[in-house]
Image (tube, grey):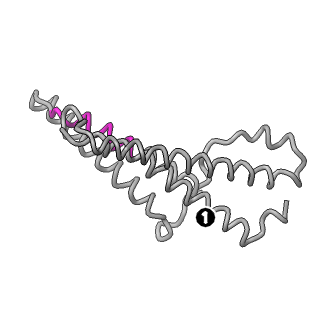
Amino acid sequence: MATNWRKVPIEGYVCFILLMAISIVMGMEIVARYVFSNSFRWAGELSRYLFIWFTFVGASYAIIENSHIKIEALKMAFPEKVRPYLEMVGNILWFLFSVFIAYIGFKYSINLLGSNNTSTAMQIPIGIVYISIPIGYTLMAFRLLWLAIKEFKYGTLSKG
């Protein structure tokens, strides 16, 4: 179920802005190509990079909306009392994985930002694109931590 627009977290607004930007850039490219028989060299590249950012920021938003794909069949094989604890273990592993990817990603992105690697059409540092990965995983780690605190605070594990 969608959240109330007044309670939409920052990731929701960022995703909206990114999708709007992609739509505008691609719309301009379509008009330029088919109406004026000309195209922008940078439009496809910019759209691709915005979509990469959208993917990783959107992954954090999907945690809030409980929209990530999960393997429910495995969970259903366990007794009902065990399922909340199994979900908690899964979230802990997911959190640890997110922290690990964020750490490795930040190191890699910082190295890329320090190098002279630039994108082909826009000539921006390629590290700006790659830093979306650790930022997205850091946001996911914070949202998983927020989810764990919420679970602990409201005691939903004891209801299992």
How many labels, in total? 1
Q: Tell me which residue sits at (80%, 54%) in the image.
A: 85
Q: Is residue 22 located in the magenta-colored stretch of the structure? A: no
SS state under label 1: helix
Residue located beneath label 1 in the image: 146
Residue at image x 67%, y 62%?
A: 148
Q: Relative to 114, is 13 on the left or the right? A: right
Q: Residue at x 57, y 58 (%)?
A: 64
In the rendered structure, which segment of residues is drawn in magenta?
A: 40-54
Q: Quadrant of residue 156?
A: bottom right
Name the image quarter holding the C terminus: bottom right
46 in magenta: yes
Say if 28 sits above or below 156 in the image.
above
In the image, is 150 to the left or to the right of 56? right
Residue 13, percent from left and from top:
40, 60
Vertical order, 160 against 27 (above or below): below
**Horizontal and vertical percent position of residue 38:** 10, 29
Q: Residues within 10 Å of mark 1 (few under 14, many from 20)?
A: few
Vertical relation: 64 (above or below) 24: below
Residue 65, picture quadrant: bottom right
Q: Amino acid at mark 1?
A: Trp
Type of secondary structure dominating the magenta stretch: helix
Image location (x, y in percent) of residue 137: 50, 50
Q: Position of residue 55 (x, y in %)?
A: 44, 44
The quarter of the displayed image where residue 33 is located? top left
Task: Give me the residue at 45% from left, 44% from top.
Answer: 105
Question: On the rendered image, what quadrant is the N terminus found in?
Answer: bottom right
